């Protein structure tokens, strides 16, 4: 068991995307809550729940997947005392992509984090392909909305 | 402006799916928070944010759409004081479907509700097509998990 503690939901999100980019299964699972009600939906995939299904899915992805650079952007975050909800775009680009290659479609993800006795952990990751969208105007820099 | 108050996140969710089934735009928008950071992702669609984009998308769907029966199932809910996160399957069936017609693929949805001064309101709806899945064993009936 990992003893990693994430003091904020953003720390958990950073660790999630670092693990995803590095194909690091233990790093990935250290982000998830040790709870049977965790939910993970990979793009176009089924709804997975519980530690076993979620671990197995990442293990499969990480063993099969080409390594990719990952850019996470356009975060909208709403945080309560116990739960924090982030909506982001994930844009993957293969490390061996050449100029002119088609850019992969962005993924839109809803990530939910729970404050547990062991710090903030992910309880929901719902990702699905999104149509390519124009970059919106930069936000005003107000930062995440916090409810408490 | 609607004066509808939803005392629980579940009440808001019930109203959301009733409005969706009835193609009731005002009923639908009465469920959403009056907040510019609301997020709505329709299946395979772009990420919409803010009241205007969200209203426009439902107006378009409701004016174009065939009326459909909607079955919502396999809810997993996690609730804090201020935020409540529900994961559900939505299965639509057209009212004029004949026996033997292909059943539409289920939709997996992540719905997030916020406790506002005007009761619980939706702030995130993220829906995407899911592969057909076998019905899992019924849950133990423990009901939604409540953190407070």
Image (cartoon, coloured by chain):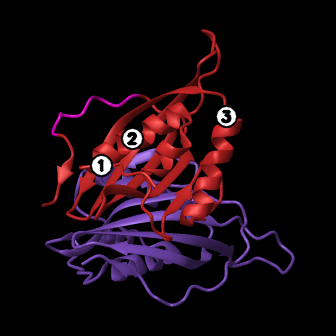
Chain colours: A red, B purple
Say if A110 sits above or below B65 in the image.
Answer: above
Chain hosting mark 2: A
Q: Earlier in the sequence, mark 1 or mark 3?
A: 1
Question: Is residue A78 or residue A9 the one in the foreground?
Answer: A9
Q: Position of residue B133 (x, y in %)?
A: 71, 68
Q: Earlier in the sequence, mark 2 or mark 3?
A: 2
Q: CA distance from mark 1 to mark 3?
A: 27 Å
Instruction: Tell me which segment is drawn in magenta.
Output: A135-142
Q: Position of residue A120 (x, y in %)?
A: 31, 55
Residue A139 is a magenta residue:
yes
Chain hosting mark 1: A
Proximity of marks 1 and 2: CB atoms separated by less than 8 Å: yes
Along the horizontal axis of the image, is B50 left or right of A1?
left
What residue does disc 3 label? Answer: A65
Q: CA distance from mark 2 to mark 3?
A: 19 Å
Q: Position of residue A60 (x, y in %)?
A: 68, 46
The answer to whether any part of residue A75 appears in the image is yes
């Amino acid at each position: 068991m990992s003893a990693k503690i994430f003091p904020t939901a953003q720390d958990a999100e950073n660790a999630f995307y670092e693990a995803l980019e590095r194909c690091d299964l233990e790093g990935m699972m250290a982000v998830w809550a040790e709870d049977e009600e965790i939910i993970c939906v990979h793009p176009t995939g089924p709804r997975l729940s519980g530690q076993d299904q979620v671990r197995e899915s990442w293990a499969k992805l990480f063993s099969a997947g080409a390594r990719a650079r990952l850019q996470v952007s356009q975060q909208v975050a709403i945080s309560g005392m116990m739960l924090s909800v982030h909506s982001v775009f994930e844009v993957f680009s293969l490390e061996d992509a050449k100029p002119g290659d088609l850019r992969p479609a962005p993924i839109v993800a809803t990530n939910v984090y729970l404050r547990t006795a062991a710090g903030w952990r992910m309880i929901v990751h719902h990702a699905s392909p999104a149509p390519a969208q124009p970059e919106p105007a930069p936000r005003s820099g107000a930062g995440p909305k916090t409810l408490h």
